[in-house]
């Protein structure tokens, strides 16, 4: 069904929408409310964009029943416009399927088990005893170590590295220059304070429908596997240390660093640039949201939304406040002293 | 003109400097004031290094008119020593130009349009309908997706990945293992809280004279392009999310994470390890400097210098203060109560 | 000696342990106390796991003399169980040695000096005048610039990039997709505020027994080398700017960003996600530990443990506190005013 021209009727059937206006209007592409032209479908998913809706030139808009009064044009009416837009978006994405088969400039170990429908790009290496299931696509210049398994319809983009003994589930995508299965960071000081390495003997297990961003690293476990569960979505430049366990359907945004032996529950959201990890293993329960830039140094046992850090401010003002932070404990004690003094007088008077 | 031997006279002409001392002195290399020998040219650009200037063994020093009294040796006198040093530095850089032509171990799609002066290294792939203009150099093991355009004299270092529909301007440099054009991080929860992806249909547009560091990632836009404007300099391990717009001549230092849909103005400086992004689109106006380690969660509408976070301190002290931060609001209320009490008494007395 | 079956007797000799129990018990693998079966050796290195020790099914446990009373089974008794475990771990690690020799699909410049015992994987490029000493292993798809030297028994994992003039010592490991020697981030504004680059003419010197994680970047120096000393261990996604000097046996955990011209002493520990760098060169003395998520903006002259930042909290509470941080200086002044008022009254009364 992937082409660049659909009638509103076709799109409404695809997402189960009601149509307002002309079902025969032709949609050639998707665009934002702001930049849409007559041939485009836009979506109105957040009240923040209400003023753009009133001005958009879009040929049709996906919106909620309750918003039909502020838009006179063609519309696809749904319960969840953003979800409908997400589903329709794939109809308009360019087809970048790789050709089926192993490129002549790839190298696949003789003991690897590669399904006939797999695509392997040039410059890619696949190690001994690897298994690549139905429909797997491994783009150019990837390197896959021995005994690694990739489930059906998973995609590795160019220049990705999987070390040995990595297990990836079905329908995953791993973006370029990510590294899965590198040695965990395990060292012990000897009696002179020199650091000896601990062999990282565990592997990595990634569930189904996991998305892993560009430049992300997930280390192999020390003795057992590092685990990323089904449906987890990981953005770019995320670091997941050895022995971590990330629960189902959790979202980890860009630049998050997760230390070794951290367990994160299901349906969590870790916003951008958070750091999670303290002096020992640490656990975040299910349904926890952590807002951007928060350092989490201790476990979180109760579901909810957590934050840390400070707001930005003009540097001069910030500096004065940050200097005072250095004596915050003292400030608190000075208040207590004042309160005691006042209490004494209150008693006297 | 690239060789490793210049007279002071030649260098003075190259940067428009006045000479103090012997114009015939031969300069074989560049060095810091601290480590320079007689054959080296050093520069004195910051008062912090004054004591080093008085002791340097350099054969000549680039400095300001006003500093000639503290240095008896040969000198290039300029208005801006650091800028003059920057310009001279390129004379002494080793020549690492690649051989012109497409390496036999590269693979270029038949529909790609490659200028005769282009260099393409071994192991590199170039997709369908790509355009590589005059003097472009693409080093080894890069992968370039379909419909990507690289402007004249731009350089991609080894193992860089450009996805499809990336447009890079003229005279850019992209360092190794960076990824431009990976899918933006766009997901919508369905009715069970499982996350569905939004196809990322936009591309990336990079202006002219943009520098992009190693391991940096710039995601493609959702519907329209992510944009990095002319003259922007981006350091290593920076993450720029989908739909961002970075204004002309802005500097983004290492390890900065910029969430999706962030707009940053012209002539901004984002120092290292800052995080920019909140719960929705966010805008930083022109001429804003953000100091190192600052989280910016809301828009900045006024030019100026902004900071956030706290200073480091001995852990014991820090811990006491950080614990008090948890009751800062209460602290403030306790002060208000004290002030009210005092006011009452003042009225009584 | 690498096989997957040892008697307790053999292992005790390997690490100099005393045996409690049956010296002939056969150990097939390593496992955690929690997951060990009868054929596994586990270790009890931290009191935190005491309850697991009492329940473990392990065939033998490495522990301290003082802990023999809480474990009835076979044991290897040592002074430092974690160190003994680290040493034994390598006996059970799978052998992933590369085949000796230069792969037919690698390309080595004719002037490079490659020891006969070196392994070079397919797709790897080695530049002019490089030197690869005895036992070096360079995995697939690496790119090594001209004049780069790798000391004996060092290993580069797949897709690593070393630019020109990088010197790596003996017995180092560099994990995948790391980049060593990219241009430092040096720019000078010209008279219009446009940024001109400074050629980065220095190289990088890495000592012996250095470990470098996946996706880590270490920039070349401006005029002289960036230096990482013997025994330093660097985790994933660390950024080390140009002209930095990292002292012997220092540990740098994941996602740490170190700005240019930072000097860090010996035996330091920089925990995860710290940022180090201010407005100029900055120095951290020996034996400094910096805890996770700390921004260090100024030099540290005294050994010890340092921290920064705030604890996480429920977002509503955090927000109220973070808003108050913006007036912390004012809060402090209000307290001083109250104290003055109280003092006055105290004098009166």
Image (cartoon, coloured by chain):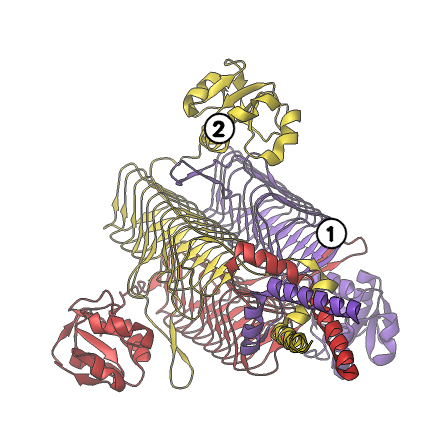
Chain colours: A red, B yellow, C purple
**Residue B231: x %, y % from top left:** 37, 45
Counting from the top left corner in percent of width and height, residue C246 is at 66, 46
Quadrant location, the N terminus of chain C? bottom right
Residue C334 pos. (x, y %): 64, 66
As displayed, is residue B324 above or below residue B264? below
**Residue B92 - label:** 2
Measured along the vertical axis of the image, is residue B7 above or below residue C226?
above
Identify which residue, B259 or B174, lies in the foreground: B259
Please indicate, yes or no, whether residue C283 appears anywhere in the rendered image.
yes
Compared across the picture, whether B291 is left or right of C11 comes to left
Question: Where residue B175 appears, x then y in whole percent?
Answer: 44, 47
Above or below, B194 relative to C92: below
**For the residue carrying disc 2, how many other residues have a C-alpha within 10 Å: few (<14), some (14-19), or many (20+)?**
many
Q: Chain of mark 2?
A: B
Residue C313 picture quarter: bottom right
Q: Residue furthest front?
A: B349
Do marks 1 and 2 share a subunit? Answer: no
**Kind of element beneath mark 1:** loop
Q: Secondary structure at mark 2?
A: helix
- Residue A46 in view of the camera: no
Relative to A165, is A282 on the left or the right?
A: right
Q: Residue at 31% x, 75% y: name it.
A: A86
Q: Are marks 1 and 2 in contact (CB under 8 Å)?
A: no
As rendered, which of A290 and A147 lies closer to the eye? A290
């Amino acid at each position: 069904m992937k082409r660049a021209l659909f009638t509103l009727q076709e799109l409404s059937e695809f997402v189960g929408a009601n149509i307002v206006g002309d079902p025969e209007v032709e949609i050639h592409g998707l665009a934002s409310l702001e930049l849409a032209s007559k041939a485009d479908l836009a979506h109105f998913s957040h009240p923040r964009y209400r003023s753009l809706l009133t001005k958009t030139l879009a040929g049709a808009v996906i919106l909620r029943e309750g918003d039909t009064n502020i838009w006179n044009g063609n519309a696809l009416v749904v319960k969840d416009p953003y979800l409908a837009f997400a589903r329709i978006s794939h109809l308009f994405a360019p087809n970048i399927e790789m050709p089926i088969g192993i490129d002549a400039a790839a190298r696949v170990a003789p003991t690897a088990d590669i399904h006939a429908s797999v695509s392997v790009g040039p410059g890619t290496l696949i190690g001994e005893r690897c298994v690549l299931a139905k429909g797997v696509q491994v783009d150019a210049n990837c390197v896959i170590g021995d005994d690694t398994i990739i489930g059906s319809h998973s995609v590795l983009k160019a220049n990705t590295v999987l070390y040995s003994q990595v297990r990836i589930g079905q329908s995953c995508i791993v973006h370029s220059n990510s590294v899965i299965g590198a040695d965990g960071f395990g060292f012990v000081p000897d009696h002179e304070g020199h650091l000896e390495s601990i062999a990282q003997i565990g592997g990595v297990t990634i569930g189904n429908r996991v998305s892993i961003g560009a430049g992300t690293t997930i280390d192999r476990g020390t003795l057992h596997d590092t685990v990323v569960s089904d449906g987890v979505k990981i953005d770019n430049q995320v670091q997941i240390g050895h022995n971590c366990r990330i629960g189902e359907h959790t979202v980890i945004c860009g630049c998050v660093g997760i230390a070794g032996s951290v367990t994160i529950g299901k349906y969590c959201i870790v916003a951008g640039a958070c750091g999670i990890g303290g002096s020992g293993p640490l656990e975040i329960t299910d349904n926890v949201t952590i807002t951007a830039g928060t350092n989490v140094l201790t476990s979180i046992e109760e579901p909810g939304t957590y934050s840390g850090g400070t707001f930005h401010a003009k540097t001069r003002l910030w500096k004065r406040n940050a200097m005072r932070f250095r004596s915050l404990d003292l400030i608190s004690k000075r208040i207590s002293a004042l309160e005691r003094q006042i209490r004494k007088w209150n008693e006297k008077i």
